[in-house]
């Protein structure tokens, strides 16, 4: 190491020296000291590396303190925060999937802030079941005899397989051995549950006789899995829920269906392709049906299982249930979400359904309002224009569906789409769009009406900042 470099390193202020300077900065008065100390260390490390790399001149304590303050403010007080979803993907898993209705939020907050009858029967003062708050709703909405809710649908599938088929065979079509995001693969979950996978049929075609021929003394379950996030098209055949039930009944073997996104509503009137609804699958006689709370249903993260009294009774007795159990906040918001389906038109109350069925003209109006919120200079500099495009449902639901949508497109010669995208991710709230053909598209289907002003403000700031 050269003598100058060594001297520069020696001149670096200590952690304590920098912290003393920061103590006088009002911008970070509410930041816990441990967090400031960690940031000081990071900033010092970076400075040390810079000096070792041969860059001359160490910064003094004042300059380093400013860096720490800037970095702390950029990081924000909370890590998990609100963003503006301008991707157009309504059920975006990375952005939190379904939004809760105001009523669901209200019920959640009430359950959080005060004691509740979570597991108390108010009539008898005896211990009650937490599931009792949603069970009757689920029975009425799906037509099933019994219901249970756990942490998410992956947990529901695990619980069902472990209960019904541990150490036994489960017959599944090769066309349904799906992988969804986040390490969920049917063969892996099956192994974890202790059930043995028996694959039948071919990737594109599975027939009733494939299931019937595979049934043996060790067969405990026939499983149907909804191919949520892809479609096999062309020369294809699958056995319907009803067909599988016929085979199962004839041989005394229960049938389970993992519906993935499970909807209560037929979305065909809004131009969506046919998807079996939960009540239809229950009516087909499937013994155990599982689906997510936060996909098309539009509620909180949860795994909902409905089915026959006999099979559900077995699930409810499994001690694994305790490890997968749903918490009171989820339960409160789930009850409110289910209530919305019984109480009226869920498209008016469930945000996910409202966004999915919102007419293009209304999305376009919102995009226009964003554009109108931009000063002329910002509009020019961003080369901002309204474009029509296509949005996705997301959440591994309705993969072939594209929704006509309207977006504010920005990015050009003065400011590249990439630069705008980067800058919008550090605004407060952050804005997440999608880049296509060197333009950043800010899809307004998923931008909430109250966020229009904030989006325009963020764009204006970005236009002026560089
Ligand atoms: C999404 C999905 C799951 C997992 O559901 P989570 O609620 O995300 O745990 C399981 N099976 C299928 C078919 C799915 O689409």
Image: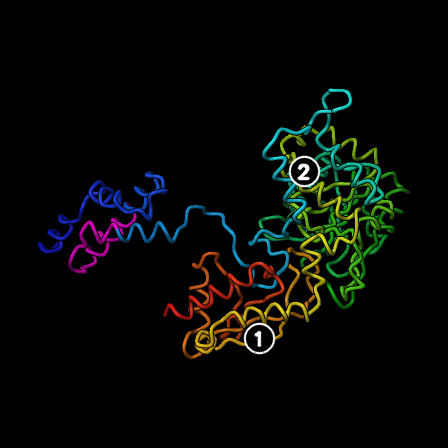
Give the mark, 1 or 2, whose residue is nearer the N terminus: 2
Q: Secondary structure at mark 1?
A: strand
Asked if the magenta segment contains residue 47, the reply would be yes
Q: Secondary structure at mark 2?
A: helix
Locate residue 148, reporting x and y percent: 74, 36
**What separation in Å lies between label 1 and label 2 (alpha carbons)?**
41 Å
> Image height check: is 150 above or below 362?
above
Q: Residues within 10 Å of mark 1 (few under 14, many from 20)?
A: some
Residue labelled 1 has its Cβ within 8 Å of some atom of ligand 1: no
Residue labelled 2 has its Cβ within 8 Å of some atom of ligand 1: no
In the picture of the structure, the residue carrying the numbered disc 2 is: 331
Q: Is residue 186 among what the camera can see?
A: no
In this rendering, would 4 be left or right of 367? left
Q: Residue at x 80, y 62 (%)?
A: 268
Q: Residue at x 72, y 42 (%)?
A: 304
Dots 1 and 2: beta carbons under 8 Å? no
Q: Which region of the structure is painted magenta? A: 41-65
Which image quarter is the C terminus in? Answer: bottom left
In the picture of the structure, the residue carrying the numbered disc 1 is: 386
Colour setup of the view: rainbow
Front residue of 66 and 320: 66
Q: Residue furthest left?
A: 3
In this rendering, would 416 be left or right of 357? left
Locate residue 380, reporting x and y percent: 46, 78
> Image height check: is 131 above or below 53?
above
Q: Residues within 10 Å of mark 2 (few under 14, many from 20)?
A: many
Image quadrant assignment for residue 442:
bottom right
Q: Residue at x 80, y 55 (%)?
A: 276
Dot label at residue 439: none
């Amino acid at each position: 190491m050269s003598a100058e470099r060594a001297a520069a390193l020696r001149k670096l202020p200590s952690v304590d020296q920098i912290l003393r300077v920061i103590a006088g900065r009002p911008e970070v008065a509410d930041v816990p000291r441990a967090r400031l100390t960690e940031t000081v260390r990071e900033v010092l490390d970076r400075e040390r590396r810079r000096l070792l790399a041969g860059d001359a001149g160490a910064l003094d304590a004042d300059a380093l303190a400013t860096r720490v303050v800037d970095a702390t403010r950029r990081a924000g007080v909370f890590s998990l925060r609100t963003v503006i979803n301008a991707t157009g993907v309504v059920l975006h898993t990375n952005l939190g999937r379904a939004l809760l209705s105001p009523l669901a939020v209200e019920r959640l907050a009430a359950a959080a802030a005060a004691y509740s009858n979570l597991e108390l029967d108010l009539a008898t003062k005896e211990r009650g079941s937490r599931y009792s708050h949603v069970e009757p709703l689920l029975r009425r909405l799906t037509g099933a005899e019994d219901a249970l809710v756990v942490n998410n649908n992956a947990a529901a599938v695990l619980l069902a397989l472990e209960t019904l088929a541990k150490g036994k065979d489960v017959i599944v079509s090769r066309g349904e051995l799906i992988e969804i995001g986040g390490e969920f693969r049917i063969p892996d979950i099956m192994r974890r549950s202790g059930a043995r996978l028996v694959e039948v049929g071919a990737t594109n075609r599975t027939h009733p006789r494939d299931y019937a021929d595979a049934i043996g003394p060790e067969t405990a379950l026939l499983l149907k899995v909804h191919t949520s996030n892809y479609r096999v098209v062309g020369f294809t055949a699958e056995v319907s829920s009803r067909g599988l039930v016929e085979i199962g009944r004839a041989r005394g073997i229960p049938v389970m269906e993992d519906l993935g996104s499970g909807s209560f509503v037929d979305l065909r009137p809004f131009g969506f392709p046919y998807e079996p609804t939960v009540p239809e699958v229950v009516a087909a006689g499937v013994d155990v049906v599982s689906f997510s709370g936060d996909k098309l249903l539009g509620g909180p993260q949860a795994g909902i299982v409905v089915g026959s009294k006999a099979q559900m009774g077995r699930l409810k007795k499994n001690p694994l249930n305790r490890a997968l159990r749903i918490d009171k906040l989820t339960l409160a918001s789930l009850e409110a979400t289910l209530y919305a389906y019984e109480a009226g038109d869920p498209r008016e109350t469930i945000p996910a359904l409202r966004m999915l069925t919102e007419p293009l003209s209304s999305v376009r109006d919102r995009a226009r309002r964003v554009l109108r919120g931009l000063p002329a200079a910002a509009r020019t500099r961003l080369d901002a224009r309204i474009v029509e495009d296509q949005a996705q449902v997301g959440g591994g639901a309705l993969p072939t569906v594209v929704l006509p949508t309207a977006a504010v497109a920005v990015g050009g010669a003065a400011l590249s789409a990439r630069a705008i995208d980067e800058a919008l991710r550090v605004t407060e709230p952050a804005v997440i769009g999608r880049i296509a053909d060197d333009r950043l598209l800010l899809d307004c289907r998923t931008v909430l009406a109250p966020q229009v002003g904030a989006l325009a403000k963020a764009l204006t700031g970005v236009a002026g900042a560089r």
